[in-house]
Amino acid sequence: MNFTGKTTVAVTDPSGKLVSRIDVNFTAGTLSVNGGASSSLGSPATIASMTAALNTALGGGGSASFANGQLSISATGGNGILVQDDAATPSSRGGAGFSQFFGLNDVFQAQMPSITSTGLAAGDASGIAAGGVIALSLKGPDGDIVRNVSITTTAGQTIGNIVTALNTALGGAATFTLNSDGSISTATSALYPGYSVNVTNDSTQRGTTGVSFSQIFGLGANAQTMQANNFNLTPALSANPARLGIASPAITGSTVVSDTIVSAGDNAGAIALQNVITRSQSFHAAGGIAAQASSLSDYAATFYQNLATQSNAISANQTTQDDRLAEANSRVSSNSGVNLDEELTALSSYQQAYAAGARILSVVDQLYRTLLEIQ
């Protein structure tokens, strides 16, 4: 499961009062209902076993299910679900909280995974079926490809097995590294500065998710592009803006059933959402932008500056390539084309040489005749 920390899944009635609470301790691998005795999340604890335990804990008040890589939690009887992390030890998997990791209350959504810090470790089962092919190319800054490699997955491979297979295929020209947060970073050797590893094909699939190995980790330009594909406001929120949570939940260790945990008129959540643009947060390296800790507004400015720099570089490179093409075409024309002035001059020279040769032959013929007459 690879979660640590604590979170609370609460069922609330329409007025914001607590119906039941389930306190989940991922570090200990347990949960408790309404402060009662702890029960196990499974041994070993997996996403599936945790979901089953959570579904049991909800009882008739709701349900939890996990299918095709998606976790769903719902309440019954017109009630709602609220998730709040522990203030001291919030839940975390690869740096993302429980609710965030599973997209339980997203304002925006996309068709491909956008959290590439998967929390997966080298020893975790990959879930990739045998026979899938991952094809890679090592591409230079000028578009030259120096290496094409591919691997075929086998049954029972772990995440670490696949990473090792990719590195073996690349033969040291480039390397993949599985980081502690479950993300994968790439680097090229000193022999290939400025080169990048691209995923040219990936027919793998993790379980029934429909997501390939490279898409899970955001490997290659195509996977990164697809993360932005169909990125939009969640349809439920677009259809009913009132669903946007503008309050801030108030669950403490002493909160019990019937206590108000969401108050009418509370706009703390809206203020927190507004402050996201100025709050410092960590951003991974992407494109030509280095990893950094900055506000969203500052990062956006850096993004547009980097985009302008790359655009200028591409325009300059295109101009250079156009000049090279024009020069190449000129040289081809000079070698294979016909220069009429040069050909006329050469023809005149050949004509004069022919005339001179004819006169010489005429003189030789006269000399030969004279010699014959002397005899």
Image: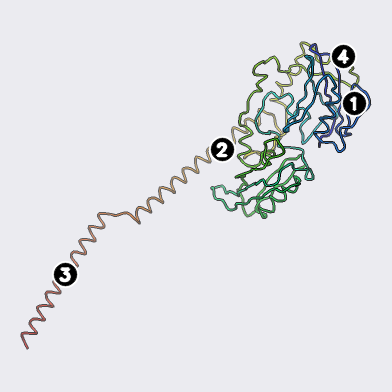
Q: Position of residue 152 (x, y in %)?
A: 67, 49
Task: Give coordinates of residue 11: x percent, y percent.
Answer: 82, 19
Q: Quadrant of residue 178?
A: top right
Q: Which mark is residue 356?
A: 3
Marks 2 and 3, the one that precedes in the sequence: 2
Q: Count up the numbered dots.
A: 4
C-alpha separation, residue under disc 2 versus residue under disc 1: 54 Å
Q: Which residue is mark 4?
A: 259
Q: Is residue 270 above or below residue 31?
A: above
Q: Residues within 10 Å of mark 1 (few under 14, many from 20)?
A: some
* Pointer 4 or 1: first along the chain: 1
Left or right of 225: which side holds 39? right
For badge 3, the amino acid type reads Ala
Find disc 1 in the rendering and name its residue: 32
Q: Is residue 219 left or right of residue 119?
A: left
Asked which secondary structure carries label 1, the reply is strand
